[in-house]
Image (tube, rainbow, N blue to C red):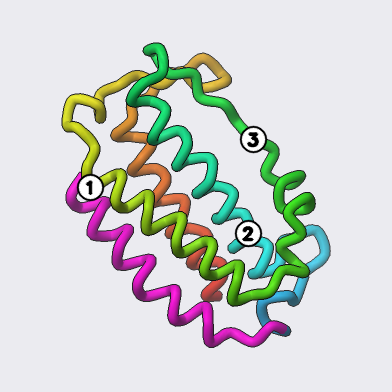
Amino acid sequence: MQTAILKFEKLLNENVNHFSTLSNEALEAKIPGKWSKKEILGHLTDSAIHNLVRFTEINYAAKPYQHRPYNQIDLVNLNQYQTMDPDELLQLWFVLNKQIVRLIKSVDEKALDYKIILSDESVIDLRFLMTDYVEHLEHHINQIKS
């Protein structure tokens, strides 16, 4: 987990400043059928909200933990990230992820093995979910930076 934590912190710290330098025009530019960079950041915010709940709940919920998916497209539209103030969106994304870093750093080693049942009935553990969260974050950060 230590490698994932270091990668996570690096992604946050390097990119919070980079994103703040992007113009609103660059953040809001859309390709038909795709999200804008602002909407991708909004999606990452939704992901942070849902995963913060998951990473917390698994510690006290019945085991195995039942993973609840969410509708990514609807959430991006309902939260109106495209029209949100870019500085507020960036702060929201950053603060949520700082809390996730704190949580991952303090997770009990045996909790990393807690089983999670996905909607397709496949089974993963908390370690995989946390590591996958960082990979997902990196993927979308790279989209924003391109």
Which quarter shows the N terminus? top left
Disc 2 residue crowd, few under 14, some 14–19, many 20+, Cα 10 Å: many
Q: Nearer the viewer, residue 123 or 42?
A: 42
Task: Give the residue number, with chain letter if any, for mark 3.
Answer: 70
Task: Give the residue number, with chain letter if any, for mark 1.
Answer: 105
Disc 1 residue crowd, few under 14, some 14–19, many 20+, Cα 10 Å: few
Is label 2 in a helix, a strand or a loop? helix
Q: Between marks 1 and 2, how big is the CA–CA gap? A: 24 Å
Is label 1 in a helix, a strand or a loop? helix
- Magenta stretch secondary structure, dominant: helix
The residue positioned 43% from the left and 59% from the top of the image is 138
Quick one: label 1 or label 3, which is nearer the N terminus? 3
The residue positioned 36% from the left and 21% from the top of the image is 60
Q: Which residues are magenta?
A: 1-24
Type of residue at label 1? Answer: Lys
Would residue 7 be counted in the magenta stretch? yes
Q: Between marks 1 and 3, how big is the CA–CA gap? A: 25 Å
Q: Are marks 1 and 3 in contact (CB under 8 Å)?
A: no
Is label 3 in a helix, a strand or a loop? loop
Percent position of residue 75, x then y: 71, 46
Which numbered mark, 1 or 3, is in the foreground of this view?
1
Q: Between marks 3 and 2, how big is the CA–CA gap? A: 14 Å
The residue positioned 24% from the left and 37% from the top of the image is 107
Percent position of residue 125, x then y: 33, 26
Type of residue at label 3? Answer: Tyr
**Residue 113 vs residue 130: left or right?**
left
Type of residue at label 2? Answer: Gly
Percent position of residue 103, x then y: 31, 44
Q: Is residue 72 above or below residue 140?
A: above
Quick one: label 3 or label 2, which is nearer the N terminus? 2
Would residue 134 be counted in the magenta stretch? no
Task: Give the residue number, with chain letter if any, for mark 2.
Answer: 42
